[in-house]
């Protein structure tokens, strides 16, 4: 079997060669890469738990770095808060 460069192939062979490369790319992408990307999205690392609760009036200008954690609730699945006095 002789190896030839793509430039030396005839136009029909170039079409077959490109079709083969495209087929291999699609096969590789859909059988290996796409499932790995989906798994990476599903099993993302969990964020660390909140370490301290501060009421909004306790946050002042002296605190330079802080983050705000918000709970996202599905509209169709109502939940109550920890104290039990509010329903989301």
Image (cartoon, rainbow, N blue to C red):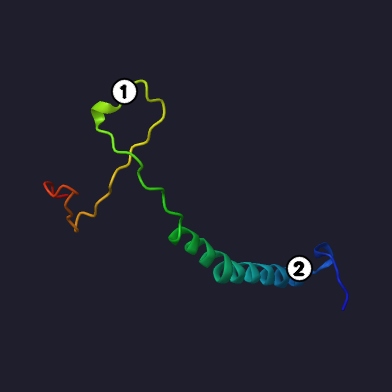
Q: Please tell me the numbered disc located at residue 42.
A: none
SS class, disc 1 = loop
Asked whether 77 or 26 is in front, the reply is 77
User: What residue did someone put label 1 on?
Assistant: 60
- What is the residue that sits farthest to the left in this orientation? 85
SS class, disc 2 = helix
Residue 71, image x, y percentages:
28, 47
Which residue: 70% across, 69% down? 15
User: What residue did someone put label 2 on?
Assistant: 11
Q: State left or right for residue 46 relative to residue 70.
A: right
Which residue: 69% across, 67% down? 18
- What is the residue that sits farthest to the right in this orientation? 2
**In the figure, residue 5 lies in which quadrant?**
bottom right
Instruction: Give the distance between the C-alpha atoms of the residues marked 2 and 1, in whole angstroms.
Output: 72 Å
Q: State left or right for residue 65 relative to residue 59.
A: right
Q: State left or right for residue 39 relative to residue 63.
A: right
Which residue: 87% across, 79% down? 1
Residue 53, image x, y percentages:
29, 38
**In the figure, residue 16 lies in which quadrant?**
bottom right
Query: How many neighbours does mark 1 have within 10 angstroms: few (below 14), some (14-19), or many (20 or more)?
Result: few
- Residue 78 to residue 62: above or below: below
- What is the residue that sits farthest to the front in this orientation? 52
Residue 73, image x, y percentages:
24, 52
Q: Earlier in the sequence, mark 2 or mark 1?
A: 2
């Amino acid at each position: 079997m002789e190896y030839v460069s793509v430039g030396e192939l005839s136009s029909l062979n170039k079409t077959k060669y490109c079709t083969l490369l495209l087929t291999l790319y699609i096969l590789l992408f859909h059988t290996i890469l796409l499932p790995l990307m989906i798994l990476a999205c599903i099993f993302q690392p969990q964020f660390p738990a909140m370490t301290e609760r501060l009421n909004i009036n306790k946050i002042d200008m002296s605190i330079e770095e802080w983050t705000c954690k918000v709970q996202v609730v599905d509209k169709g699945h109502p939940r109550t808060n920890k104290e039990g006095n509010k329903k989301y």
